Amino acid sequence: MAVRFVQISDLHLGRNWGAGRLPADLQAALAAAALGALHNACDLVAEVDAAALLIAGDLFDRPEVEEELLVAVQQALAHVARPVLVVPGNHDALGPTSVWNAALLGELDLPPWPANVHIFTSRAFTPVSVADGAAQVFGHCVAGYDSATDSPLAALQLPARPPLRILLFHGALLARAEQRSTLPFTLPQLKDLDADYAAVGHYHRGRALEVPGRILGAYAGTPVPGDVGEDPHGGVLVAEVAEGRVALHWHLPHPGRFVRLDVVPNEPIDSPEQALAAVRTAAAHAALGPEDIVFVRMGGASTIPLDTTALTSALAADFRFVEMIDESEPLQVRPGGRDTIERRFLEQLEARLQQTDQAAEQELLRAARHYGLLALRGRDVRPFAAQRSAEESEHHRGYVDDAH
């Protein structure tokens, strides 16, 4: 017998969309789209005759939630005619001030969770029967861990089939040693458990968890991307599970992407028109368009100062939102020009570069030339490379292999 489940996770409702870099109206639109994705998941339960709605963590971006958002989510879930099974994630973790804490809701005179919503609050995996007993969902509450062996998965003993055995947890595949707040696991560990399916949250890109010849589970991914590093994003997932067989069907309610676009022209940029053409060529190659939020990094070389404000304005109709940061290498001024501070600065740095063969010193001198010229020309000297590194950290979004 096959049993269907609708799976979502990582909506991060209440998050600071775009880390505060987006205009307020766009942030509000993304927040509405995320709540709309939840409604989409609730509707799908009836449409596909699912046994339950599985929420695999980080439904909210933090444990404390504004009352208006709490009530909106509760009302959406109350209309689901089947069980809604929820595991807290690392962002909306269960605790004294958590939205999942029933006692706190009572103390604050806030509405309780609807009767059809079951929240897993134990570190140990505990079962809930669904589909008239044809399946059991084993969920747990995320806590701190030291390794893949320091987890409830390592001690879990599943009952014999039938019924179908479904795992529901918020976890990091092949987690790095320093991760402590999200359950780490490996594919061999998951395979050895021999569950029929694992509904997993935490990573924002949807993907199946597979070994040769078998789907072990899946990340649904985030239905609405909220920052760079979440491209491609996930969606609302319908998993059809039978003993020895799993079929996955993603529904992508949000068409837009949230990307950083690196533009490195083959030839030095010597006009605004050439810069615009380079961006549009790169965007077309990446299949970006009016639904997408794009942060452009202009690399390569330029013979002119690039007016990023004017270029951004010229690109406004190409994307839903665009921001450009110039990280191109300003070419040296041509010989025979006026004697200026800029010329002397470039000549002295060029002389230093010719005098050293140390790679570290050469890199430092090139960085000094790049940022020094930006400063002399009154342009933004933000260390964009460092910013990109932060954006691609575990917070933005914790992928540990290339099968996103």
Image (cartoon, helix red, strand yellow):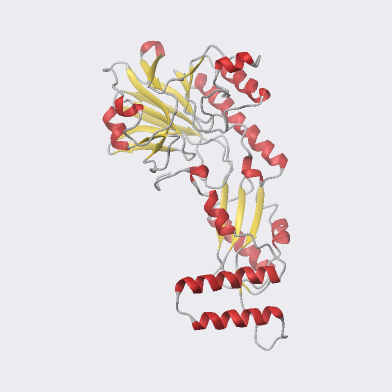
Residue 301 appears in the rendering: no
Q: Work out whether 238 lies above or below 359.
A: above
Q: In the rendered view, does 174 fall on the left or right side of 17?
A: left
Question: Between 321 and 282, which is closer to the camera in this rendering?
Answer: 321
Percent x, y of residue 11: 55, 33
Q: What x and y, as percent, mark residue 200?
A: 42, 31
Does residue 381 sit above or below 119 in this rendering? below
In the picture, the quarter occupied by the N terminus is top left
In front: 142, or 14? 142
Q: Is residue 377 above or below residue 31?
A: below
Residue 325 or residue 45, whichever sits in front: 325
Tell me, yes or no, if residue 325 can be seen here. yes
Q: Quadrant of residue 143?
A: top left
Q: Position of residue 278 (x, y in %)?
A: 60, 64
Could you tell me how many numbered marks the image carries?
0
Say which residue appears at 71% left-offset and 58% top-offset.
314
Q: Quadrant of the C terminus?
A: top left
Q: Residue at x 55, y 59 (%)?
A: 385
User: Against 337, is 36 above or below?
Assistant: above
The residue that appears at 36% across and 24% down in the rendered structure is 241
User: Residue at the bottom extreme?
Assistant: 336
